[in-house]
Amino acid sequence: MAAAMALVRGVRFGSYSIGRSRSLIFNSLQRRGIAACVDPSIGLTDEQKEFQKVAFDFAANEMAPHMAEWDQKEIFPVEAMRKAAQLGFGGIYVNPDVGGSGLSRLDTSIIFEALSTGCVSTTAYISIHNMCAWMIDTFGNNEQREKFCPDLCSMQKFASYCLTEPGSGSDAASLLTSAKLQGDHYILNGSKAFISGGGDTDVYVVMCRTGEKGPKGISCVVVEKGTAGLSFGKKEKKVGWNSQPTRAVIFEDCAVPVTNRLGAEGEGFSIAMKGLNGGRINIASCSLGAAHASVLLARDHMCVRKQFGETLSNSQEVIIDACVQFLQFKLAEMATKLVASRLLVRQAAVALQEGRPDAVSLCSMAKLFVTDECFAICNQALQIHGGYGYLKDYAVQQYVRDIRVHQILEGTNEVMRMIIARSLLTES
Amino acid sequence: MLPLRFRRVTMSARVLVGVKRVIDYAVKIRVKPDRTGVVTDGVKHSMNPFCEIAVEEAVKLKEKKLVKEVVAVSCGPQQVQETIRTALAMGADRGIHVEVSGKDYETLGPLQVSKIFAALAKKEQADLIILGKQAIDDDCNQTGQMTAALLDWPQGTFASEVTLEADKLKVVREIDGGLETIKIKLPAVVTADLRLNTPRYATLPNIMKAKKKKIVNVKPADLGVDVSSRLEVLKVDEPPQRQSGVKVETVHDLVEKLKEAGRI
């Protein structure tokens, strides 16, 4: 075995490129299977393990080697994402008749969790893209589905979800972007803020006001890039999520055909919220992947880093023991919270798939709990790395920076609490 | 009926691909405390990387319409079905699971496997067998060669390029001296080397289609093969720990030290 390993490694270090570039000696994420207690494939069907394997392999070979560069140079990795789409990741829970993969929410969660270990920011964008494709697939009529979904599933075209405005974030139903009916077009006026992919994407799923105040006056329309009156703000400079551009999307007398409206007038808010239920599971899954990667990185660091004469994973002296044992216990807590988070997300995915009455609350609980816990896990992993954790040479800081925003978008964790409280306190 | 050797290969060619379930290449190997082998319980397993390359080559031949059917074969206990499913997800048409378990599986080696493959090749009327050049657990590099010998078929081992020209196979082999090109008649055995191709990722739709493809169970006895081993493993040890070196000042010292160590 040693000889073959040497051969394979020799080729990695040499000038041959093995296409799938298995050059990940230094990426200890490849050390799968040793920590059985945090193994993400436990409890999955054989088929789900296959999906997960493809996603892990893709993340390790096509994403992880570039994640630092994409972050530092703020590159939107179109080619890598199109490769992912070729494997079926462009419309994971979209119907196969329009090019999707037709998988369940649980399958989707497993896939995003695995992809996220390669690059959180890119995977999070892919999940937003998937959400938009699903909204058109589910609420669009046949013409709309056939017009937009195949290109979205292949990632020939990219999508953005436009709900938030400068004046309405958590209070999404108070949005102001207006859509006045003129003949067979809606004329859109207003602006959206913090739009992921904005400016670089081709298809915008926009929630706008066609009727009265409040949620019942909101409709959902699809706006294509290049439409007159559609423009973009400057690219925002962010702490993380740098492999996707974030811009304001501006509508100035932007004429959108009525045939681009998804569902009926007044259904837009409900469509948006249904999209977000799945989106919350996806975002939570991305946090899971980052936390999983961070736990493994912290574990590996502790097995290597020597202080007080021993590695942080061993220790002989009593006094030193307490200090080092604290870190070992911290690692155990991180692993426990990781597994607890994973179980909650997967349960929420199943509930959503089955259309259970508790699905919305469970999705909110999952998003709330998992994004908070996983950020704490990644943060603690950074701490375990000591000074090295603060250097950009080490991946753990990117996981921390990238998942920090998961506690804010797709509904702040405060809004999640609102949803859960309402479900507990309202008499049904 | 014509002897296998002289059957002309037509578009109805059938390829047998061997896939072995091995400990994943990224796992850190540990020797069992009783030193009879390595720890395999609870350890991540996957398809041997060279077998992946073999499957990819077979599927590519099918996509070029040069062969009609790709059959994935694996020998071992129930778990090897996962490995066959991976091959099916990459594009193989059906699978054969040769059931070998327990002590027989622990002692299963190239000689028995090659006998199984030879028997299957005759039973399935295969025209081409593609195997990985070696497995990353035992590094034997024997199964392909032994299979060819048992069938009296030509072999193209360490292949880095395979081209089908009518009923002949042009194989470019990686050898110590460089690259050697040979032409062999079908039916033949080919073993895949690292640079033969880049294995594809299974796509989500293909993984789902693979569920519907058939895997047939076969026992070695049904093929008339005796899987008992002629080898006995005496012990398994970790490689010796690397010792620290010694710095010397002059070339003369270096020569003296090498003589002392009996190296020259």
Image (tube, rainbow, N blue to C red):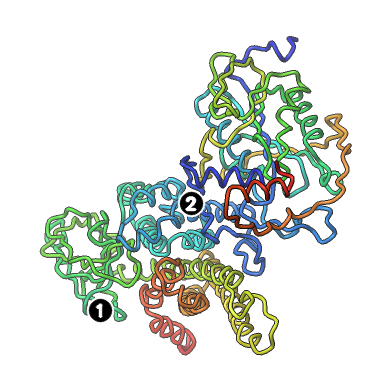
At 53% across and 16% down in the image, what residue appears?
B165
- Amino acid type of disc 2? Asn
State which quadrant residue A401 falls in.
bottom left
Q: Earlier in the sequence, mark 2 or mark 1?
A: 2
- Amino acid type of disc 1? Ser
Taking the image as shown, residue A7 lies to the left or right of residue A261, namely right
User: Is residue A133 in sight in this rendering?
Assistant: yes
Quarter in which the N terminus of chain B is drawn: top right
Return the residue at label 2: A61
The residue carrying pointer 1 sits among few (fewer than 14), some (14 to 19) or many (20 or more) residues within 10 Å by Cα, namely some
Taking the image as shown, residue B140 lies to the left or right of residue B8, namely right
State which quadrant residue A261 falls in.
bottom left
Above or below — where is A249 with respect to B261? below
* Residue sitting nearer the eye, A160 or A255: A160
Chain label for disc 2: A
* Residue sitting nearer the eye, A416 or A311: A311
User: In this figure, what is the number of numbered marks?
Assistant: 2
Q: Secondary structure at mark 1?
A: loop
Taking the image as shown, residue A120 lies to the left or right of residue B80, namely left
* Distance of label 2 from label 1 (alpha carbons): 40 Å
